[in-house]
Amino acid sequence: MNWATARKLLPFALLALGVAAPFALPTFLVQLTFLWIMIVFALCWDILGGQMGYNSFGNIAFFGIGVYTATIVQIGLYQDVASYTAAAGMQTISLTPDQYFTGLFVGLAAAPLLAVAVAALLGFALLGLRGHYFAIATLGLGIAAGELAAAWTFLGGASGVQVPVYPGSLESGRLLFYFLSAGLGVATFLTLRWLYTTRFGLAMNAIRDDEDKAEALGLRTTRYKVIAWCIGAVFLGLAGGLVGHIIGFIDPREVAFAGASFGVWMILMAILGGKGTLWGPVIGAVIFHAMRELFWTYLFGWQNVAMGVLIVIVVVFFPVGILGWLRRRYPQLFVRDVPAASRGAAE
Amino acid sequence: MSALLEVREVSKYYGGVIANEKVSLTVAEGRIVGLIGPNGSGKTTLFNSIVGTHPIDGGSIRFDGREISHLRVPDIARLGLIRTFQQTRIFRQMSCRDNMIVSVPQGDASLRAMIARPAAEDRAHADELLAFVGLASKRDLPAGSLSFGQQKLLEFAMALMNEPRLLLLDEPTAGINPTLINGLIERLKRARDQLGITLLVIEHNMRVVMNLAEHIYCLAHGELLADGRPEDVQNDPRVVAAYLGGH
């Protein structure tokens, strides 16, 4: 089998692996679920950070909105939310399977909608800023969102929200959320793969390379930037909705608006794999997640030091990411075999 | 011939510095007009005022009879008024062909047009124009890997791809190999003759501007010093004095 064929079969092999993994490695089910979430994180950050050259530290806000929305909607369908959150976990909620699943899917539909609405509003306010100013503004955004949630009693304030318990066995619940997360990861990947071959993808790259020039050619760059941010918010909102259920408890700063962990990781993963590429964030997420789990298991106590060393190594030796490095080292692996006429725009 | 671009008494100040003071000029449809003047005389400032990079402090700018001095850069560009930059600007990490395809006219700004795949005719047109400027063999290379002169040619081709009615060129021959300059003059003239694009050109190279322009405006110290046929302007004692530092 030559490399060209292998490359075509690779996505299917990975997909098969993804389906088989939870059955082959049942003890790692939660970690595997989070792997897909990490892939979504990295891919979504890369839309603006990689393809468009806009470094955002605030993407976690859309994730957090998704976390809260999905659960609050699910509870709100059957119970008074304010009294539930006021009880701070002392009041239990038990939903029948029918109620649970209806609430779950209504919540998962509402989560991306609210995330996109907020992204659109914030986008028009923030995306007029460029470069470092945008980065700093988004940094404030993520932190402010966490503080806001922690002070909002309707959302349980700093004591958070207890997520309704899955009405079946623990195992079946975990499997369900594994496959929902995997589906989300694949959907995110396919959507972006398509997006990057359209004129929209080209316009994003143009904005990254020279925004003034893009404007001088008549591109309404702010519109492109806001739409790109909203696309990221859709998938981050969905990811948030799932993560709330996977963890089972929403803490405003540690789970929903976890800027210091999820918020930073999504950037690191994209850069590690190779920002501005389609596969880079995926590769980065897999390696980062695996390393993180290994560090936490074998270097406990020193895990953050090891993580820091890894980051330094990446930035110093792989400034263009693993994929970027491979592309320079082995360009022959990336030669396209598609006819030039039907060639897509950006990979 | 009607006036495509009418700049009337445009002023632009940077604090107390006068960049442009009541500059007026007219570009008739289908003409090639030159804009000359010593360094710092306000030529690029005037370009920036015309394309909406900064607000002007007085005067009016009309394009095809419509006031455009309050419009923003992309909106002016979509009317068919495109500029190139003195410090050549291209999309460095993108291939030459993608540079061309992203430069298509942005008249249809619907979401549907945004997320369409690049049309086959756009690719064909891109290749055609790349061949027109002599960059056909470079089309798959990243634009940033081209030489400075080639980047200038690419930027010119990108401007043509946008199908402008009026093209403002800021020193199109600066940094280009002298033997290529004749070819570029030839192409600029063909852009006007065959594609019907009106040109307003800032140029320092006197030989180029004398060969190219049918009418010349000369700026000095932010003010219009002289205008007329190339040979008249070239021999105007005030212009000569401005260039030799007589002011």
Image (cartoon, grey):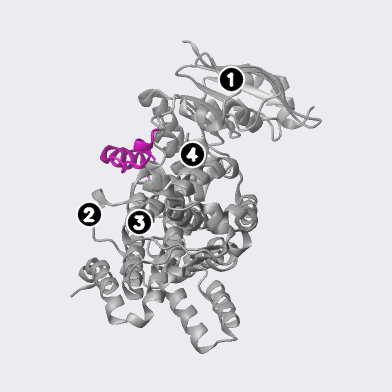
- Residue A198's disc is none
Q: CA distance from mark 1 to mark 3?
A: 87 Å
Q: Is residue A264 above or below residue A196?
A: below
Q: Mark 2 or mark 4, which is nearer to you?
A: 4
Closer to the chain start, of discs 3 and 4, is 3
Residue tagged by mark 4? A223
Q: Is residue A66 above or below residue A266?
A: above
- Dots 1, 4 in contact, CB < 8 A: no
| Crowd tier of the residue under label 1, counting other residues whose Cα lies within 10 Å: few below 14, some 14–19, many 20 or above | few
- Dots 1, 3 in contact, CB < 8 A: no
- Dots 1, 2 in contact, CB < 8 A: no
At x 59% / y 41%, what residue is drawn? A125
In the rendered structure, which amino acid carries the disc numbered 2?
Pro
- Residue A99's disc is 3
User: Residue A285 at what x, y percent from top left?
Assistant: 43, 70
Q: Mark 1 or mark 2, which is nearer to you?
A: 2
- Residue B231's disc is 1
| Crowd tier of the residue under label 3, counting other residues whose Cα lies within 10 Å: few below 14, some 14–19, many 20 or above | some
- Residue A339's disc is 2
Q: Mark 1 or mark 3, which is nearer to you?
A: 3
* Main secondary structure type of the part rendered in magenta: helix
User: Residue B55 at what x, y percent from top left?
Assistant: 66, 28
In the rendered structure, which amino acid carries the disc numbered 3?
Gln
A72 or B109: nearer the eye?
A: A72
Chain part drawn in magenta: B110-134
